[in-house]
Image (spheres, rainbow, N blue to C red):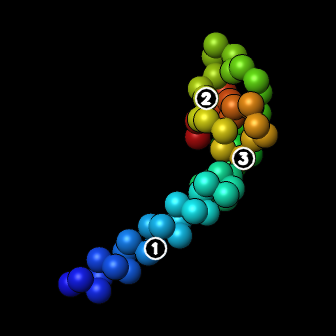
Amino acid sequence: MACFRVVVLVLLVVLLMNAVENEAASFPWSCPSLSGVCRKVCLPTEMFFGPLGCGKGFLCCVSHFL
């Protein structure tokens, strides 16, 4: 059981290091896959989903989901 915990801990550390190094690579989806647009500020009719592959300072804005 202790071996399993060590493996899980190492896996989480590796994923965390990857996320810190490249935020866009840590997500399995991106703004274009959600039919979104990268903007500085989302329109009132849009939902924002965070950076999701957009450049620094930009948000992923989605006008409709699905």
Q: Looking at the image, can residue 35 be seen?
A: no
- Position in image of residue 11 (x %, y %): 46, 73
Identity, as a three-letter code, of the amino acid under mark 3: Gly
If the image is split into quadrants, where does the N terminus sit? bottom left
Tell whether 36 sits left or right of 11.
right
Q: Which residue, given by chain and number where applicable, does mark 1 sit on?
A: 11
* 32 to 7, vertically: above or below: above
Choose mark 3 or mark 1, whichever is in front.
Answer: 1
**Gap between marks 3 and 1, in whole Å?**
23 Å
Contact (CB < 8 A) between labels 1 and 2? no
Q: CA distance from mark 2 to mark 3?
A: 13 Å
Please state, as top left, top right, bottom left or bottom right, where the C terminus lies in the image: top right
Residue at x 38%, y 80% (from the top left corner): 7
First-in-chain label (2 vs 3): 2
Q: Up-down: is 6 above or below 36?
A: below
Instruction: Indicate the position of residue 23 as horizontal and vertical percent values.
Output: 65, 51
Task: Pick whichever, 61 or 1, lies toward us.
Answer: 1
Amino acid type for the residue under numbered disc 1: Leu
The residue under label 2 is which amino acid type?
A: Phe
Earlier-in-chain disc, 3 versus 1: 1
Q: Nearer the viewer, mark 2 or mark 3?
A: 3
Residue assigned mark 3: 53
Number of the label disc, if any, that sits on residue 48: 2
Q: Is 28 left or right of 9, judged from the image as shown?
A: right
For numbered disc 1, what is the local secondary structure?
A: helix
Q: Quarter-wise, where is residue 28 in the image?
A: bottom right
**SS assignment at label 2:** strand
Give the structural element (helix, strand or loop) at label 3.
Answer: loop
